[in-house]
Image (cartoon, rainbow, N blue to C red):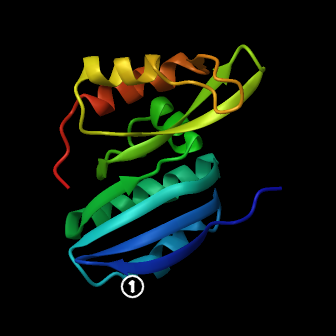
Amino acid sequence: MDSELKYKVTKKSDEDVIYLSGSVGERSLKVLNEIAVQVVGDRCRFNLKGIVNINSIGFGSWVHFFVRFSEEKVVIFEDCSYECLRQHVLSSALLSFGTVTSCFLPFWCDDCDVEVSVQLRTGTDRETFLDEVDKLSCSRCGGNLVVDEEPVLDFAIDMFTDSVDE
């Protein structure tokens, strides 16, 4: 069973950085509301690398929270986990309340039969992004990496071709 949603709040220059981990589920709205009380600035960065699962009730809590929260704060999502991207592909509401600056995408190495999670950043044009993806190689064997799930790559291509104002 996956862990409940956990968080850590840190300060980084002019913004709060919230590191989320675990599962977004039945009790997540309470946790998100606890975060809202602690955030004092007008910019907030959510690091989503640690999100491992989002169930339907958690998804509803997420949307309910960010509808209100994003009206008062500039929201930035960074290091979005594969689970966040997968959920966003199913319903574009998940990450629509802020700017996505980076994410992790699953790739597969055919040579050594291993899945690799690769961090990719926004702020590049489509051609540059696709060129960078084509150049990815396995850290274990040096073989070429191929994307593990096409719908998530399609979303990332759309996301990466937009310029980002951080």
117 on left or right of 66 = right
Residue 43 place in picture, x, y as percent? 24, 70
Q: Is residue 136 left or right of residue 69?
A: right
Q: Is residue 28 visible?
A: yes
Q: Residue at x 64, y 23 (%)?
A: 142
> Observer-nearest residue: 143 or 89?
143
Above-or-below relation of 44 to 129? below
x and y percentages locating residue 37 in the rendered image: 39, 85
| Residue at 68% across, 20% down | 109
Q: Residue at x 65, y 62 (%)?
A: 26
Up-down relation of residue 56 to residue 162 (above or below): below
Q: In the image shown, does 104 or 89 lie closer to the viewer?
A: 104
- How far across and down, in percent of the image, does residue 162 sit? 21, 33
Mark 1 surroundings: few (<14), some (14-19) or many (≥20) residues within 10 A? few
Residue 96 at x, y percent in the picture: 32, 45
Q: Which residue is mark 1?
A: 37
